[in-house]
């Protein structure tokens, strides 16, 4: 099995034993009931898989989000949507292959689809810049979002990036400004917007196409201001503490839903989206259609108001006062007694 993760080893071992028993029953000792043995291993395999994948740690979910066989943006554009037609260029500098945009159909709706795209091999990763968009990628996305807004087409974005490209060229062409403009303009677009984190949701690179009426996240995806490795390097001076950082950051789908930073979790097949791509694409389609119908039912003014309030509510916290520095509040009786 290619690309096996460390925590999947018990499953791999059981699967290997099962395959060997089926392929070469003559190698095993006489008197063994092979059918019963196979059934026992199959039952143990199902239970082991269930126990592992229902109790994943935050770091293990990060590993699944980065799995190289996981469906990428173009896989969903081709299977969840129909009649996808890609459009290119920001009309300012260049074409960015890390950001894929175009028109498509979702059920009976004409929509604009936008997403970050990774590569499957070294050659494609170089072409796609490992899914990290340049400023022109965000400007291309905004150009087409404005076009969709003009013609009243809903916008669907798929997020799968470790972050925007931090290179010298991107800084020279103002990557921070490009993302900031997208944040501002996406709050003002009058058409429905749905964003879905399908894998990695890293920093401003993800948020640059993530301002939406509904933010969905797949069960084994993550959404964070910094990667676990980056956080570990800052806090513990050692990237080996990434598992500890992943837990502290609360970046998994369940945590984000509790914190109200996302609106809905899209369930994945047991073992991850890559284990059953067809089921995953159909599941995503059902969630997108339901949410789109609900958003379309809202008047434009109410939709914009809810979108604004949604993001204004992010990041609220309450500090517990320090008893040592907080003066007790006097009751009226105490105040009168002190004055006398």
Image: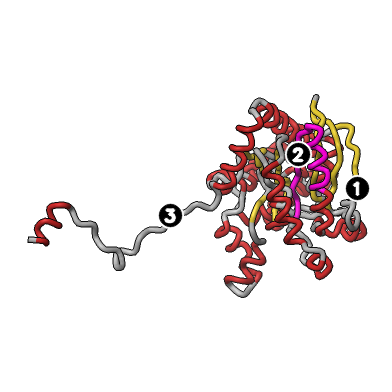
Left or right: 34 as drawn, with respect to 53: right
Residue at x 84% of width, y 54% of height? 98
Q: Nearer the viewer, mark 2 or mark 1?
A: 1
1 or 3: tag closer to the N-terminus? 1
> Which residue lies under the disc numbered 2?
156
Q: Is residue 114 visible?
A: yes
Q: Residue 142: x percent and y percent? A: 79, 47
In the image, is residue 76 above or below residue 92? above
Answer left or right for 259 relative to 267.
left
Q: Earlier in the sequence, mark 2 or mark 1?
A: 1
The residue at the far left in this view is 340
Question: How far is mark 2 from mark 3, CA to CA?
Answer: 34 Å
As helix, strand or loop, the secondary structure at mark 3 comes to loop
Gap in angstroms between the C-alphas marked 2 and 1: 17 Å
**For residue 143: magenta?**
yes
Q: Which residue is mark 1?
A: 88
Q: Secondary structure at mark 2?
A: strand
Q: Quadrant of residue 266?
A: top right
**Residue 190 sits above or below residue 15 on the image:** above
* Observer able to see residue 14: no
Q: Give the magenta part as a residue range.
A: 141-161
Q: Are marks 1 and 3 in contact (CB under 8 Å)?
A: no
SS category of the residue bearing label 1? loop
Q: Which residue is identified by label 3?
A: 318
Task: Name the residue at the bottom extreme.
Answer: 237
Residue 304 higher or lower than 334, as above or below: above
| Cα distance between the residues tagged 1 and 3 | 45 Å
Instruction: Choose top left, top right, bottom left or bottom right for residue 7.
Output: bottom right
Q: Which residue appears at 61% of the width and 62% of the height?
A: 243
């Amino acid at each position: 099995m290619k690309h096996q993760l460390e925590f999947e080893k018990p499953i791999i071992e059981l699967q290997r034993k099962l395959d060997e028993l089926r392929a070469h029953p003559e190698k095993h000792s006489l008197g063994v009931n092979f059918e019963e043995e196979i059934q026992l291993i199959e039952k143990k395999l199902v239970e082991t898989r269930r126990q592992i994948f229902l109790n994943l740690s935050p770091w293990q979910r990060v590993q699944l989000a980065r799995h190289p066989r996981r469906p990428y943006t173009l896989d969903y554009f081709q299977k969840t949507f129909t009649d996808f037609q890609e459009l290119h260029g920001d009309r300012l500098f260049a074409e960015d292959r890390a950001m894929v945009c175009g028109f498509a159909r979702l059920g009976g709706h004409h929509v604009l689809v936008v997403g970050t795209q990774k590569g499957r091999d070294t050659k494609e990763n170089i072409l796609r810049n490992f899914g990290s968009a340049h400023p022109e990628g965000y400007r291309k996305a905004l150009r087409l979002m404005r076009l969709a807004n003009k013609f009243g087409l809903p916008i669907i974005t798929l997020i799968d990036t470790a972050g925007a490209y931090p290179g010298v060229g991107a800084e020279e062409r103002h990557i921070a400004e490009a993302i900031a403009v997208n944040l501002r303009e996406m709050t003002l677009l009058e058409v429905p917007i749905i964003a879905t984190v399908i894998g990695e949701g890293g920093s401003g690179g993800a948020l640059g196409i993530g301002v939406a009426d509904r933010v969905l996240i797949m069960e084994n995806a993550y959404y964070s201001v910094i990667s676990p490795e980056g956080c570990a390097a800052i806090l513990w001076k050692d990237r080996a503490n990434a598992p500890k950082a992943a837990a502290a950051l609360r970046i998994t789908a369940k945590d984000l839903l509790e914190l109200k930073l996302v609106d809905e979790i899209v369930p994945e097949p047991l073992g991850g989206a890559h284990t059953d791509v067809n089921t995953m694409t159909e599941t995503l389609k059902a969630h997108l259609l339901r949410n789109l119908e609900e958003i379309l039912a809202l008047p434009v003014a109410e939709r914009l108001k809810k979108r604004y309030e949604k993001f204004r509510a992010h990041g609220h916290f309450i500090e517990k006062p320090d008893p040592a520095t907080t003066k007790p509040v006097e009751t009226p009786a105490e105040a009168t007694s002190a004055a006398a």
